Image: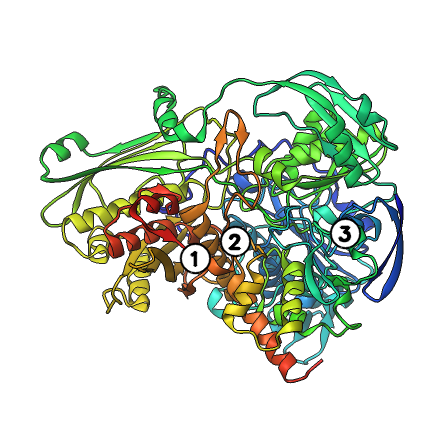
Amino acid sequence: MTPKREAPFTIEPERYEFTAPPSYVFQSGRRDFFKILGAGLFIACAISKAEAFQESGGRRNSEDSLPQEISAWLHIGEDGTITAFTGKVEVGQNIRTSLTQAVAEELKAPFASIRMLMGDTQLVPFDMGTFGSRTTPIMNLQLRRVSAAARNFLLGMAAKQWDVAQSQLKAEAGKIVDTQTNRSLTYAQLVKGQQISQVVPAEGPLIPPREWTVAGQALPKVDGRDFVTGKHRYPSDQKLPDMLFGKVVRPSAFNATLASVDTKEAEKLPGVIVVHDATFLGVVAPDSATAAKAASLVRAEWKTEPQPSSKELFDYLKKNASPRDERNDDSRSETGNLDAAFASSTHTLEQSYNVNYIAHAPLEPRAALAHWSDDQLTVWTGTQRPFGVRTELAEAFHLPDEKVHVLMPDAGAGYGGKHSGECAVEAARLARAAKRPVKLVWTREEEFTWAYFRPAGVIEVRSAVGDDGKITAWEFHNYNSGSAGIRTYYDVPNQRIEFHSVNSPLRQGSYRALAASANHFAREVHMDEIAHSLKLDPLEFRVKNLKEERLRAVFEEGAKKFAWGGTKTANHGFGMGGGYEKLGFVATFVEVAVNRSTGDIKLVRILTAFDCGAIVNPDGLRNQLIGANIMGIGGALFEAIEFENGRVLNNVFSKYRVPRFRDVPLIEALLIDRKDQTPVGAGEAPIIGLAPAISNAIFDATGIRLRSLPMAPLLAPHGLRFS
Amino acid sequence: MSDTSLHINGHEYQVTVDRQTSLLSVLREFLDLTGSKYGCGEGQCGACTVLIDGKARRSCLLPLSAAEGKQITTIEGLAKGEQLHPVQQAFLDEGAMQCAYCTSGMIISAVSLLNANRNPSDEEILTAMQGNICRCGTYPRILAAIHKAAGVLQRGQP
């Protein structure tokens, strides 16, 4: 692991990640694996409690049990097939490929002989979920360890069989080779007829990144062919014999209560069942069109209450902050003497920044197929937290965990938006009433309304700077948007940083980089404002206040590649923004162009310099980095949930603008491959620099300072627009 | 509720269903052709795109009655046996996917474009593809894949 760093260089706890405490009982004993997978070698890796804290951890007392703190295991079958098991799931971040590379590398087995079994609660070790960019720093490491242990075990088996010293043997391409005689045994031959299960400690040397031959390579997506031929079955594509289709009758507004309901008309449709249970109202039908029709025939009266609306959102957030809990308070940090520093300073600046609620809008909406067999429940669903969904199901139906089986086929994205299991619970409730399997796929309108949102927020920043351009004081208050990335990585002796929680008017939760986007937006725009007020170059000003070598490096190397400070076309502007998030270092540079006669502004190019340690798959990394920037264009320029009295007003793509082909400028990735550093995640961090870089570039081109996301609507009063 | 016959991917199908049902629902629920995806139901995202007589159409908005008698091609019918269509191959070669939920609609839309124009400019590709959403943001690679497939098709390969 990376040596422990001083704060803020750790993953900061994020209060809005949807998580649940691990209340896990292992479903399968190790002998069950031989039943499922056949004979062979089964290796599990035990890790320390501290490491297990976030990702794993189980308990079971029977003789057959696996020990606590197992996060990964693998099986080598008699036919040479290697199966690695993980609770992480694939939602487009391409970890099925990068984790396979890690196993192939350490096990010295052919890439094609390895399959990843992911997100199946009966077969994989407990896992908190796929969020927080933890797959690469933690799961990748665990799979490397269990694979290295398996390789070592196979070497030992061969040494014993040949009665030679293990030191004269080597593992390569799925075989153990005797370097003295050149004889060899494949892994399949070694495990033939065996049922060996081993739990090994997570220690022993790993192959250093500099010596990687499979990891570190730009290997294409596993099963790519299934995706270009339509063969892959996403959660919404699952089916079972006798399956029916469900539809939920939604309340007319958030927090509405059901006053009365008349289901007679709906029940007249052939094959339709209406389910009304406490607050839940739904229908089941032989096909989705009939289900939609039946739902529309349910006459429900809802009682609603007045609620805050998006028009008054930022006022509301500021005025409704909860009082601080003095007893147990980690929401505020203070160093130095802030008041004294402000009192003695000549250059001070105070500004406020806003971010709106935005939606994840994964292209595949929530979907679940639920099936009851007696009191055993099986659900296939798109989720980033299969074990979390299992808990939700177990609680909703008063079942023990072992009666619930959740499976997660590779899904149509999440971006932090699929941590919850409401669709699975709804499908299961409908299936129980219908006594047949039921599939439920949320509509786009439901996904835009009844999922959860990235938190909105108000951020107030006050700063003081000395004549030498060094920041002396920094005060930062975040109302509601969250605490990820709240601390400054610039060196400031006197600081007060505080998060203020608010009873959010909308349901809110995880998102790609979550609050880090808002906190970096406020901080990096504010840095630009100070630099301009002091007539300092924004790069020079940042570097002057930055000790962290890796962060300086991304700013400086990125600036060089971008030609920061070089010649600029008339009416073009340059801007930068960057920082540190989820253990990765980011600097993004943006060029915008303004057409003075038409008022059109466009993005010309984006460059992101990124250091996430040793790179596991540069092709997948580029895809994630460029994708994060493109997704970030939406939140920076266009996206905002508009709501009024508990109703979302723009719950369709025709009213909610997400980035499309024409919105995409030239985007360059400058990947800094630090082979001396542990690999860390890359799905989230590259999004954080974009919004401030765009704001700063617009200021550079126009002199207009934009302090609220999304920015495009703010340009209209200036006669400007994003085309 | 009546019988409708459909020509899909070179096969004949008979379905008994309300003729106002969307083609997408029929493909997915009655014929188990799940390669065409639901993304929005309002023709805004392109995930459901199929070819009707060689041209891209949004199957979520197309009533069954309007598809009758037409040649329908879905993503499942694009390859010839094991031989991928050049657009499919180009998407693989360029790694032009992440979660890949949009991919079948992207590929079908690109095939429609290339059926009409073997040598599209960037501008023509953007115009043709603007109605397809990729939330993972894989647009630059999709653009590159379409150019690559255009090159293959111009050289007269499959």
Q: Are marks 1 and 3 in contact (CB under 8 Å)?
A: no
What's the amino acid at mark 1?
Cys
Q: Secondary structure at mark 1?
A: loop
What's the amino acid at mark 2?
Thr
**Residue shown at 75% from the left, 70% from the top:** B79
Chain on which label 2 sits: A
Q: Secondary structure at mark 2?
A: helix
Q: Quadrant of residue B56?
A: bottom right
What's the amino acid at mark 3?
Leu
According to the picture, the residue beneath numbered tag 3 turns out to be: B23
Q: Is residue A44 above or below residue A111?
A: above
Q: Quadrant of residue A448?
A: top right
Q: CA distance from mark 2 to mark 3?
A: 41 Å
Depth order, front residue of A575/A406? A575
Q: Nearer the viewer, mark 1 or mark 3?
A: 3
- Going by the image, does A707 lie left or right of A44? left
Q: CA distance from mark 1 to mark 3?
A: 45 Å
Q: Are marks 2 and 1 in contact (CB under 8 Å)?
A: yes
**Residue shown at 33% from the left, 51% from the top:** A720
**Residue shown at 43% from the left, 52% from the top:** A633
Chain on which label 1 sits: A
The local crowd at label 2, few if under 14, some if 14 to 19, many if 20 or more residues have their Cα within 10 Å, is many
Q: Is residue B94 above or below residue A33?
A: below
According to the picture, the residue beneath numbered tag 1 turns out to be: A612
Q: Are marks 2 and 3 on the same chain?
A: no
Depth order, front residue of A642/A513? A642
According to the picture, the residue beneath numbered tag 2 turns out to be: A136
- Going by the image, does A545 lie left or right of A697? left
Tell me residue A577's x, y (percent): 32, 53
Q: Are marks 2 and 1 on the same chain?
A: yes
